[in-house]
């Protein structure tokens, strides 16, 4: 029976989600796992320039994998001439900058999986598998979304709902005490997400997704992206890539320049927190030069809905001071 009365729960809105038709899982990597299961792939080609957590579902399903390098435009340097029916290529929409290239790629490769973890606002392509990680864009404890081209031979309704109640403390701590106080909790939460079983997205995360002002987030991200690009484009190695894409609520402003590894330390010291994409790439062989250059020198500058022009000016002033 439904419980009536008693104490109140959190008051959350019930607005429309941005991806209402996507299948909902407990993490982005598990959304990928579902895609791999449904398609019964036995081998997957992955970029060297990626987070190592992407291997969790691949190894769990005992799928063979092979890495491929990318060039200065984030595009594959070399790929097999033909993909077998049970082989797939995973391509990352890097920083949301590669949608135009993906439109060309889908014409060449049938067994394509698009990783839109860094491109939440990109629409899915009909007939192409893709997955998203909304917690990279919003204050969420977990969750992943998937669009699957095949009929659901693996019924998601049979999966249990995950529970997010133990993954919220870092979010509440940041709200009340700031990011420094909650950073160790954030890192603990990242560990909790490692190797989770394939489950449906928790009720809490689904409710939170229906509580977000997506259009406002999209608008602010675009304004902030253009603001930084206007000042940094003459120094940014990625300017040609950026200028050949449509700005669409990008996750960060990717600023790439030799020597940015030292600038990263100064930004963090000045409380401008920029991540490294991805630390595991630094362990690659020296021959994979482009991936190493990106891992060391690419600064993902914050542009999201939390920040205004004053915040961005502080970022720029700090860059000018230490660059």
Image (tube, rainbow, N blue to C red):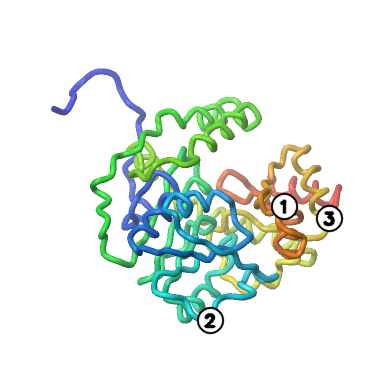
> In the structure shown, which secondary structural element does the residue marked by tag 1 occupy?
helix
Residue 23, image x and y in percent?
33, 54
Instruction: Residue at 66% x, 50% y: name it.
Output: 280
Whether residue 215 is visible here, answered yes or no, is no
Indicate the quadrant where residue 41 lies: bottom left
- Nearest the eye: 322 or 227: 322
> In the structure shown, which secondary structural element does the residue marked by tag 3 occupy?
loop
Measured Cα–Cα span from mark 1 to mark 3: 15 Å
- Nearest the eye: 140 or 153: 153
Measured Cα–Cα span from mark 1 to mark 2: 29 Å
Q: Which mark is residue 81?
A: 2
Is 57 placed left or right of 318 in the picture? left
Sequence order check: which comes first, mark 1 or mark 3? 3
Looking at the image, residue 55 lies above or below residue 97: above
> In the structure shown, which secondary structural element does the residue marked by tag 2 occupy?
loop
Measured Cα–Cα span from mark 2 to mark 3: 37 Å
Instruction: Residue at 61% x, 67% y: name it.
Output: 68
- Nearest the eye: 10 or 165: 165
- Name the residue that disc number 3 marks: 259
Judged from this view, the residue extending furthest toward the left is: 1
Whether residue 11 is visible here, answered yes or no, is yes
- Name the residue that disc number 1 marks: 282
Q: Nearer the viewer, mark 2 or mark 3?
A: 2
């Amino acid at each position: 029976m439904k419980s009536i009365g008693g104490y109140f729960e959190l008051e959350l809105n019930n607005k429309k989600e941005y991806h209402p038709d996507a299948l909902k899982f407990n993490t982005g990597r598990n959304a990928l796992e579902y895609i791999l299961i449904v398609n019964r792939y036995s081998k997957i080609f992955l970029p060297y320039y990626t987070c190592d957590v992407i291997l969790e579902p691949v190894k769990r399903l005992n799928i063979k994998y092979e890495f491929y390098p990318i060039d200065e435009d984030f595009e594959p340097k070399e790929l097999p001439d033909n993909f077998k029916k049970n082989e797939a290529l995973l391509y990352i929409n890097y920083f949301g900058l590669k949608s135009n290239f993906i439109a060309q790629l889908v014409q060449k490769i049938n067994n394509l999986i698009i990783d839109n973890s860094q491109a939440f606002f990109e629409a899915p392509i009909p007939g192409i598998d893709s997955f998203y990680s909304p917690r990279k864009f919003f204050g969420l404890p977990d969750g992943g979304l998937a669009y699957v081209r095949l009929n659901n031979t693996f019924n998601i309704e049979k999966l249990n709902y995950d529970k997010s109640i133990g993954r919220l403390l870092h979010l509440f701590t940041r709200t009340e005490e700031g990011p420094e106080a909650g950073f160790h909790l954030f890192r603990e939460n990242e560990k909790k997400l490692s190797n989770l079983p394939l489950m449906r997205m928790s009720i809490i995360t689904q409710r939170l997704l229906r509580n977000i002002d997506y259009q406002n987030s999209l608008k602010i991200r675009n304004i902030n992206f253009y603001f930084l690009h206007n000042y940094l484009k003459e120094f940014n190695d990625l300017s040609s890539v950026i200028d050949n894409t449509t700005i669409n609520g990008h996750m960060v402003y990717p600023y790439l320049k030799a020597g940015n590894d030292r600038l990263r330390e100064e930004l963090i010291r000045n409380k401008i927190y920029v991540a490294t994409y991805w630390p595991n790439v630094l362990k690659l062989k020296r021959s994979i030069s482009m991936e190493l250059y990106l891992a060391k020198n690419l600064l993902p500058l914050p542009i999201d809905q939390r920040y205004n022009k004053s915040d961005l000016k502080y970022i720029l002033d700090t860059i000018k001071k230490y660059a």
